[in-house]
């Protein structure tokens, strides 16, 4: 049998047991401390929630008791601030939060930024971004370091209000490896002026950034982005064109149908599908002939979407009845009949 | 002469068992360290806000939730209610009635005011006949599909055919999802720009927990020892295996109790296999195979956050059936795709994951059971064998108990599902007893699974909620 002595094994086991006991005790103490902290936070919340409400809703001075003295009280304040920022859009409350955080919490967050633990630094950066704390110098120190993707993301959010002049440069430098989701989160949080500046440099962004940017413009539902979006319809990348059609559909305005007509016969079914949606923004009498093509499309998805879109139009059911009688395409007829039998849904 | 043959055999088997134990302990320890590093990185990170981030519709991808139901009249309405309260911007719920013979369908129709609709099905996957489709008048995103009985896999395939969204989530009828479950499992997909094509969540045991509409209010502990042992087992399986396997893109199993898949790729590999016992593992293996064959830059991930609670069997009989079935399913899938094993064409799936699953997960029980018998024989033979017996016993302690205890403490430190210290101590105590009673039992049941596989027995023709006892114990 392979050589393995009982003594050695017993030693290994004893060492491991001791290690586990130590780790167990550490976890237990940590748990107790955590409970204690949570209790402290809850006590602060119970005691001061009303006072915070009074402070936010009146013009009075800040009372001494609201100023947090311990980490757990800071966590209580954070919870209150976050919930106000999320649920109330009053600019004076935002201003008050910003002033208070800069005066009483700034030092705490700067300490978090200096932590060796990644998770603690992230928590600090997030708060700085949430409460818009003035600390450009400290944040720029992250430049030289081997900054993680998550840190770069939070830093960009911070630079969108602290370092606006250089935002585009920072964006290009720090967004390496960002997913579409991260780009979207970032673009949602920045204002129109910065968005406008990005439009002029969009080609420099990685593809994920370009897709996200177009999606976000669509979600703004603002006609002022239509010029840019329509220019993207001629983009050589298929995905950009599809996203653009989707964004224009979200805005809900088709200004010149001629610009879109080619997509009805696009070699890509995804573009035809988007057209089946987009045409729903125009009166049926203007689009009827195009819908006929889409209803007889070779792709199930396109046929289905075309029938659904028509079904939503006030004259849609009549159109589908007529179509169903005149078409020679069996699959198109089935699709039209499904919508007819479900009363347009 | 006879004595020297006996000596040779004892030494031979002793070495095999010893090498196996050392390999297993080594690989589990590596995986434990791996999990610790991963969890350590996110320790103290403010998680609640991160979850909030994903809720907005502009970031998420819509998901179709497929609920296969066969004779689920007791729990189906509650299940649907809990799915309707999931926090996710855009979902549709497709309940597939797989030819139930009870009042499943009537209850759903009555409770949710379902109305028959006309629907043309795009049969991307071949299935048994769909008889009718209903839509709820109260919740337009709730559909009920009535079909001929064809088993769970067939029901899921019907759900995929009907699903209109690019991702689908399959859940067991008796799974209880946390409110944020979908957000958690969709996170890797959203963050990776769809490089991740399937994710599975961390499954926990619901017995003993106070769960209302998907939220856990109190984490106590079941009084049933079998259940407590299964809690330990689940914790260990996730911490000692899946976190590391997921990081290395070696996941071969994600639980059917709750998982999300990209519809496109599932259709591409032919959907769920209707003639296998472990349809969930089989699908994941097919996807992994496809990824490697086509050299795609895609991944399958496991999400360590606890997202889904499932009820564990409370009696030996039910547990035995469940384990036998799981093991049979495992071997079936490994056997079906045996040519992947050691095949460098399949990358790390062929060179690491398959050999690991064959040796540790599949044949492991055989060797470990051999180890138990070996130790007993050694004690009887006495003399030098006594030393072997003690060495093997110590390795069993190291493997069976200490690694389990380590994972319980790691869990208490990282996610703290059981905030009461007494519960954790109880789990640790039970983990220490495992090698004396629970482990040999599960080994026997898994051996039975191997026998069933060899004899080609299949006892799950219809879709059955296997192993999950229905009852008030939750």
Image (cartoon, coloured by chain):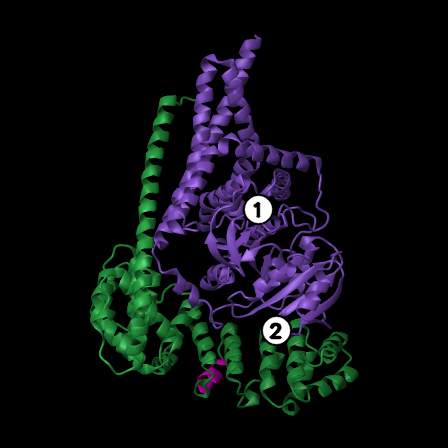
Q: Is residue A233 magenta?
A: yes
Q: Give the colour chain A carries in the figure.
A: green
Query: Residue at coordinates 79% horizontally, 83% vertically from top-left?
Result: A325
Q: Where is residue B258 in the image (x, y as percent from the top left)?
A: 56, 55
Q: Magenta stretch containing residue B410, yes or no? A: no
Magenta residue span: A226-234
Residue A21 falls in image quadrant = top left
Instruction: Name the chain letter of the residue that bears numbered label 2.
Output: A
Q: Which residue corresponds to the image point at 54% horizontal and 61% vertical from the top-left?
A: B213
Asked if residue A268 can be seen in this view, the reply is: no
Which quadrant would residue B104 be assigned to in this image? bottom right
Q: Name the residue under label 1.
A: B312
The chain drawn purple is chain what? B
Mark 2 secondary-structure assignment: helix
Q: Mark 1 lies on which chain?
A: B
- Between residue B145 and residue A172, name the one nearer to us: B145
Frontmost residue, B185 versus A63: A63
Residue corresponding to mark 2: A269
């Amino acid at each position: 049998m392979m050589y393995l002595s009982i003594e050695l094994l017993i030693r290994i086991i004893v060492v491991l047991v001791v290690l586990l006991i130590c780790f167990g005790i550490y976890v237990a103490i940590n748990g107790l401390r955590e409970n204690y902290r949570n209790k402290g936070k809850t006590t602060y919340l119970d005691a001061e929630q009303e006072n915070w409400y009074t402070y936010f809703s009146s013009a009075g001075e800040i009372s001494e008791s609201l100023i947090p003295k311990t980490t757990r009280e800071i966590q209580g304040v954070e919870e209150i601030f976050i919930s106000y920022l999320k649920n109330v859009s009053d600019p004076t409350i935002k201003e008050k939060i910003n002033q208070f955080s800069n005066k009483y919490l700034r030092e705490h967050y700067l300490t978090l930024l200096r932590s060796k633990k990644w998770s603690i630094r992230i928590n600090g950066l997030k708060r700085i971004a949430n409460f818009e704390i003035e600390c450009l110098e400290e944040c720029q120190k992250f430049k030289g370091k081997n900054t993680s993707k998550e840190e770069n993301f939070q830093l960009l959010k911070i630079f969108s209000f602290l370092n606006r002049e250089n935002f585009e440069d920072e964006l290009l430098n720090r967004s390496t490896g960002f997913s579409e989701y991260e780009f979207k989160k970032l673009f949602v949080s920045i204002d129109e002026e910065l968005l406008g500046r990005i439009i002029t440099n969009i080609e420099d962004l990685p593809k994920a950034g370009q897709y996200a940017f177009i999606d976000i413009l669509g979600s703004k539902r603002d006609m002022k982005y239509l010029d840019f979006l329509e220019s993207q319809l001629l983009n050589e990348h298929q995905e950009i064109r599809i996203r653009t059609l989707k964004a224009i559909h979200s805005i809900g305005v088709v200004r010149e149908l001629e610009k879109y007509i080619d997509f009805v016969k696009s070699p890509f079914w995804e573009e035809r599908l988007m057209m089946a949606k987009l045409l729903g923004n125009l009166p049926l009498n203007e689009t009827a002939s195009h819908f006929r093509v889409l209803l007889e499309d070779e792709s199930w998805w396109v046929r289905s979407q075309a029938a659904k879109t028509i079904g939503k139009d006030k004259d849609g059911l009549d159109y589908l009845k007529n179509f169903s009688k005149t078409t020679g395409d069996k699959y198109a007829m089935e699709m039209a009949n499904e919508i007819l039998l479900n009363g347009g849904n | 002469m006879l004595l020297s043959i006996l000596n040779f055999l004892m030494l031979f088997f002793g070495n095999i068992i010893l090498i196996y134990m050392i390999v297993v302990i080594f690989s589990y320890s590596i995986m434990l360290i791996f999990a610790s590093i991963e969890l350590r990185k996110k320790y103290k990170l403010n998680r609640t806000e991160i979850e909030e981030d994903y809720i907005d519709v502009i970031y998420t991808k819509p998901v179709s939730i497929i609920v296969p139901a066969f004779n689920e009249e007791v729990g189906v309405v509650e299940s649907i209610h809990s799915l309707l309260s999931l926090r996710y911007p855009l979902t549709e719920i497709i309940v597939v009635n797989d030819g139930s013979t009870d009042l499943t369908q009537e209850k759903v129709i009555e409770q949710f005011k379902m109305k028959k609709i006309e629907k043309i099905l795009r049969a991307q996957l071949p299935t048994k006949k769909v008889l009718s489709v209903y839509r709820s008048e109260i919740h337009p995103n709730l559909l009920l599909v009535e079909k001929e009985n064809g088993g769970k896999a067939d029901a899921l395939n019907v759900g995929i055919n009907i699903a209109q969204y690019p991702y689908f989530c399959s859940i067991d009828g008796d799974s209880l999802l946390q409110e944020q479950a979908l957000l958690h499992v969709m996170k890797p997909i959203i963050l990776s720009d769809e490089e991740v094509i399937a994710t599975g969540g961390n499954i926990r045991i619901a017995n003993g927990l106070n769960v209302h509409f998907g939220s856990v209010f109190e984490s106590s502990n079941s009084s049933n020892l079998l259940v407590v042992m299964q809690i330990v087992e689940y914790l260990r399986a996730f911490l000692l295996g899946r976190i590391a396997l997921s990081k290395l893109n070696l996941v071969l199993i994600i639980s059917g109790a709750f998982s999300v898949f990209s519809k496109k790729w599932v259709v591409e590999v032919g959907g769920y296999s209707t003639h296998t016992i472990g349809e969930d593992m089989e699908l994941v293996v097919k996807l992994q195979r496809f990824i490697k064959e086509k050299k795609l830059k895609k991944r399958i991930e496991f999400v360590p956050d606890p997202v889904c609670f499932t009820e564990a069997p409370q009696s030996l009989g039910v547990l035995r059936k469940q384990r036998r079935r799981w093991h049979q399913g495992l071997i079936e899938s490994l056997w079906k795709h045996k040519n992947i094993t050691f095949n460098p064409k399949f990358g790390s799936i062929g060179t690491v994951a398959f050999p690991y699953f064959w040796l540790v997960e599949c044949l492991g029980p055989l060797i470990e059971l051999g180890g138990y018998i070996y130790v007993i024989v050694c004690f009887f033979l006495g003399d030098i064998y006594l030393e072997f017996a003690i060495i093997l016993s110590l390795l069993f302690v190291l493997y069976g108990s200490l690694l389990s205890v380590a994972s319980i403490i790691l869990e208490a430190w990282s996610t703290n599902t059981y905030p009461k210290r007494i519960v954790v101590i109880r789990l640790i105590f039970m983990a220490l007893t495992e090698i004396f009673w629970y482990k040999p039992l599960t080994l026997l049941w898994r051996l039975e699974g191997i026998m069933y596989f060899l004899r080609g027995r299949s006892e799950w023709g219809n879709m059955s909620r296997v192993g999950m006892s229905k009852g008030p114990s939750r």
